[in-house]
């Protein structure tokens, strides 16, 4: 089960273009649960991206609203 902070981080990753203010512990948990992956950009920076599983969780949350 995800904490409210982890769910919020998942939403921020999906919707925000600038993700420099993400909590590292929440991000690590999302990566561990395979809800987020890190993709390497041409600049060498790593960019968090929602996986299919992460997208499914966000869709389920949206349906509950």
Image (cartoon, rainbow, N blue to C red):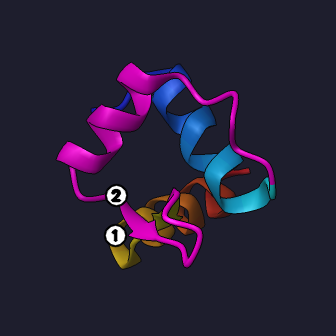
Crowdedness of circle 2 by 10 Å Cα count: few (<14), some, many (20+)?
many
Label ID, residue 11: none
Residue at the spot x=74%, y=50% of the render?
A: 65
| Magenta span of residues | 18-46
- In the rendered image, the vertical position of residue 42 relative to residue 63, given as above or below: below
Residue that carries the numbered disc 1 in the rendered image = 53
Was residue 55 drawn as part of the magenta stretch in this picture?
no
Was residue 27 drawn as part of the magenta stretch in this picture?
yes
Q: Do labels 1 and 2 touch, CB within 8 Å?
A: yes
The percent position of residue 51, horizontal first and vertical second, equals 39, 72
- In the rendered image, the vertical position of residue 55 relative to residue 14, given as above or below: below
The percent position of residue 33, horizontal first and vertical second, equals 21, 49
Left or right: residue 17 compared with residue 44:
right
Residue that carries the numbered disc 2 in the rendered image = 35
| Residue 52 quadrant | bottom left
The percent position of residue 39, horizontal first and vertical second, equals 42, 70
The percent position of residue 35, horizontal first and vertical second, equals 34, 58
Residue at the spot x=53%, y=37% of the render?
A: 7
């Amino acid at each position: 089960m995800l904490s409210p902070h982890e769910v919020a981080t998942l939403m921020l990753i999906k919707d925000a273009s600038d993700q420099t203010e993400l909590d590292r512990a929440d991000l690590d948990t999302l990566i561990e649960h395979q809800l987020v992956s890190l993709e390497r950009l041409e600049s060498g920076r790593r960019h968090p991206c929602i996986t299919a599983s992460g997208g499914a969780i966000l869709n389920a949350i949206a349906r509950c609203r």
